[in-house]
Amino acid sequence: MDYTHWAGRDASRAFVTGDYSEAGLVDDVTGLSSSEILTLHNWLSFYEKNYVFVGRVVGRFYRKDGMPTSELTQVEAMMTKGMEANEQAQREKQKFPPCNAEWSSARGSRLWCSQKSGGVDRDWIGVPRKLYNPGSKEPHCVCVRTTGPPSDHQDSHRHLNRGDLDNPNLEEYTGCPPLATTCSFPL
């Protein structure tokens, strides 16, 4: 790709959307999602760390005197929200790591938990459960800790030693024993 047409212009939106047409090479980032704004933040951090600063582009985000505009302040606030949402998602993934899953036309579906399922290393295995997140249309399979206090009350001395099994956003899989680490659903 020829990047010379980017020189001296802010084409932030194209970096996220992949639209490198003349219409897409713009600095307008309104309407981008939190994760897309976070992608821009990561891109900016990479360039700040690996390239020599030579100046700012005057326009939507910087004035002629080099000072930021109110639009830059708004985008920075969006970046902060995106980073907070990402951190929350990472905390949620530690609490409820995704299940391992496989499907075959001969055997059907299988969901299972291990100490590394979902890419989350931990000292417990857990059991598969449907997790319903507010705002999501469909549940997804997560591994749930079955012993100790609930994750949200780690310092509680009074608990039922059921881990996170009583979380109201969880549901057992029909036909799967409640404490099984593997659930199979034949065709």
Image (tube, rainbow, N blue to C red):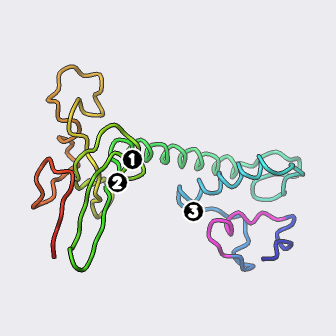
**Residue sitting farthest toward the top:** 157
Q: Is residue 11 magenta?
A: yes
CA separation, marks 2 and 1? 7 Å
Q: Which residue is mark 2?
A: 98
Q: Residue at x 10, y 53 (%)?
A: 177
Q: Circle 1 — which element?
A: helix
Q: Which residue is mark 3?
A: 32
Q: Amino acid at mark 3?
A: Leu
Q: Considering only vertical position in the picture, is 80 above or below 159?
A: below
Q: Amino acid at mark 1?
A: Lys
From the image, state whether disc 2 or disc 3 is nearer to you.
Answer: 2
* Mark toward the start of the polypeptide (2 vs 1): 1
Q: Position of residue 178 (x, y in %)?
A: 12, 49
Q: Position of residue 50 (x, y in %)?
A: 79, 50
Q: Amino acid at mark 2?
A: Pro
Q: Considering only vertical position in the picture, is 25 above or below 82?
A: below
Crowd band around label 3 with a 10 angstrom C-alpha radius: few (<14), some (14–19), many (20+): some
Q: Which residue is mark 1?
A: 93
